[in-house]
Image: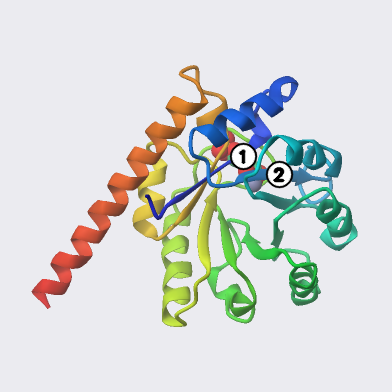
Amino acid sequence: MSPLKLAPSILNADFARLGEQVAEAERAGADRIHVDVMDGHFVPNLSLGATVVESLRRVTALPLEIHMMVADPDLFLDEFVAAGSDSFLVHQEGNPNLHRTLQRIRTLGKRAGVALNPATPAASLDEIVEDVDQVLVMTVNPGFGHQQFIRTSLAKIARVRGLIERRQLACEVEVDGGIDVETAPLAVRAGATVLVAGSALFGEKLGIAAAMSRLRSAADAALRAAEAADQAALQRS
Ligand code: DX5
Ligand code: ZN
């Protein structure tokens, strides 16, 4: 089994067939479902609310991961928990009480993660990384699907991975935005272990299952190559 996790983002799904598409992603081996919540303030777009999560909860056993792109995530936590959410990714930016928000998520019995926009430095995790289960490195500016992967975020992924390893934390490094067969291997080589993908899975003509297996093979091959390179470096030293 691959140590890499795939988290299909439903933002680019066909909402008229959302249940079917999520069930297909589950059958094809998705590890969790990534749900993008946008309020038109934190990002210039609207997406969906807790009622959609409630419906999804009835069609999938997979963990539902909620990416909160909203100005005040605290306002919505209770209703998303009641709807059946399993984890929350909240943004570092614009949250003066980030620590409190994360503590509340954990008190509610859910996994907590912090998300970083492209312009937010990895070093900003210093005071919070021990309080989270996952870090989400945004590899596009949040708000829309189908954007181009920002290459400079690769160095940030590596910095986040380094910070986590130095402290020997079990925290996951997740990437979100522009992830496809070309960019997933780069993100994995930089240290990502969870890949969010929207348009590369739901927008593909070849179908969700085939798109997932293609993405997973590309990512797994990159992981094996990175491990072999580490091994070779170790033997040289
Ligand atoms: C963007 C969202 C992403 C989005 C990714 O703000 O956070 O989860 O759905 O879509 P793609 O994979 O198309 O970039
Ligand atoms: Zn997202």
Q: Determine the CA span between mark 2 and mark 1.
A: 7 Å
Q: Is residue 211 left or right of residue 198?
A: left
Residue that sits furthest to the left in the current view: 236
Q: Where residue 57 sits in the image (x, y, percent)?
A: 75, 41
> Do the residues bearing badges 2 and 1 touch, measured as CB atoms within 8 Å?
yes
Q: Residue at x 23, y 52 (%)?
A: 225
Q: Residue at x 71, y 44 (%)?
A: 36
Label 1 CB-ligand 1 distance < 8 A: yes
What colour scheme was applied to this rendering of the protein?
rainbow
Label 2 CB-ligand 2 distance < 8 A: yes
Tag 2 secondary structure: strand
Q: Where residue 120 sits in the image (x, y, percent)?
A: 61, 64
From where the camera sits, is residue 46 visible?
A: no
Question: Which numbered disc covers residue 43?
Answer: none
Q: Where residue 51 sits in the image (x, y, percent)?
A: 86, 39
Q: Mark 2 or mark 1, which has the lower sequence index? A: 1
What is the three-letter code of the residue carrying label 2? Answer: Asp
- Looking at the picture, does residue 109 appear above or below residue 147? below
Question: Which numbered disc covers residue 9?
Answer: 1
**Crowdedness near tag 1: few (<14), some (14–19) or many (≥20) residues, C-alpha within 10 Å:** many
Q: Nearer the viewer, residue 211 or 155?
A: 211
**Crowdedness near tag 2: few (<14), some (14–19) or many (≥20) residues, C-alpha within 10 Å:** many
Q: Where residue 130 sits in the image (x, y, percent)?
A: 59, 79
Q: Quadrant of the C terminus?
A: bottom left
Which residue is denoted by mark 2 in the rendering? Answer: 36
Tag 1 secondary structure: loop
Q: Is residue 207 left or right of residue 100?
A: left
Q: Residue at x 67, y 64 (%)?
A: 111
Q: Residue at x 77, y 64 (%)?
A: 94
From where the camera sits, is residue 5 visible?
A: yes
What is the three-letter code of the residue carrying label 1? Answer: Ser
